[in-house]
């Protein structure tokens, strides 16, 4: 692997981890306070599971981004990058809406858009790198679960 590839890989993973960190600025203070007071569905996981899952997903997202970034000459490169950054921004905005604003309905509206953006990202990444697209499947599955959880929290606490 060339030094430029190593730098792109590190930059890709760090970018995604920074997005996760920005989201955590909204999430972390709300967990022991507001979130602790919410009625939760029976399938709500324990709080400790969220951090390692998200860290792992952001690593996979970064590696996925790297494999696409290595192909800037591909005709789908620009649109794939746009969708990736849209979903990354929507991911941060979900934390701001749900935890920061304490607004499960707004969070639900955002996470539906996030799910669509992830799906479009995967579709475009697959055209450039099957591996890059496949790396995002756990993210789509987790956000599918998070969408159900968000909806349930909204319904139970409105």
Image (spheres, rainbow, N blue to C red):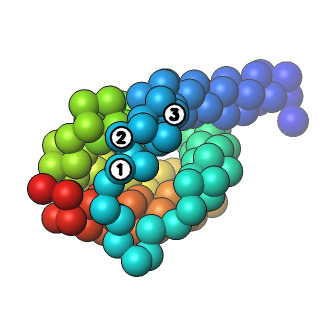
Mark 3 vs mark 2: which is more N-terminal? Answer: 3
The residue sitting at 42% across, 49% down in the picture is: 36
Q: Label 2: how many residues lie within 10 Å, few (<14), some (14-19) or many (20+)? A: few
Mark 1, secondary structure of its residue? helix
Mark 2, secondary structure of its residue? helix
Mark 3, secondary structure of its residue? helix
Q: Is residue 116 visible?
A: no
The answer to whether residue 109 is above or below residue 133 is above
Q: Position of residue 111 (x, y in %)?
A: 28, 50
Q: Label 3: how many residues lie within 10 Å, few (<14), some (14-19) or many (20+)? A: some
Instruction: Decide which of 108, 43 is in the foreground and name it.
Output: 43
Quarter of the figure that contains the C terminus: bottom left
Q: Are marks 1 and 2 in contact (CB under 8 Å)?
A: yes
Numbered tag placed on residue 37 in the rendering: 1
Instruction: Decide which of 37, 57 is in the foreground and name it.
Output: 37
Q: Are marks 1 and 3 in contact (CB under 8 Å)?
A: no
Instruction: Decide which of 113, 22 is in the foreground and name it.
Output: 22
The residue pinned by badge 2 equals 34
Q: Position of residue 6 (x, y in %)?
A: 80, 28
Instruction: Decide which of 50, 132 is in the foreground and name it.
Output: 50
Front label number (1 vs 3): 1
Q: Is residue 103 visible?
A: yes
The residue pinned by badge 3 equals 28
């Amino acid at each position: 692997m060339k030094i430029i590839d190593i730098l792109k890989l590190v930059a890709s993973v760090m970018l995604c981890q920074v997005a996760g960190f920005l989201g955590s600025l909204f999430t972390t203070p709300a967990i022991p306070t507001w979130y602790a007071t919410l009625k939760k569905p029976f399938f709500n996981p324990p709080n400790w599971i969220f951090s390692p899952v998200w860290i792992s997903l952001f690593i996979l997202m970064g590696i996925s981004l790297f494999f696409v970034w290595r192909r800037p000459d591909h005709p789908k490169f620009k649109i794939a990058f746009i969708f990736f950054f849209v979903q990354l921004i929507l991911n941060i905005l979900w934390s701001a809406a749900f935890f920061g604003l304490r607004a499960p309905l707004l969070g639900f509206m955002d996470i539906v858009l996030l799910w669509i953006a992830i799906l479009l990202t995967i579709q475009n990444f697959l055209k450039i790198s099957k591996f890059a697209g496949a790396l995002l499947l756990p993210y789509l599955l987790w956000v599918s679960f998070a969408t159900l959880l968000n909806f349930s929290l909204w319904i139970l606490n409105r």
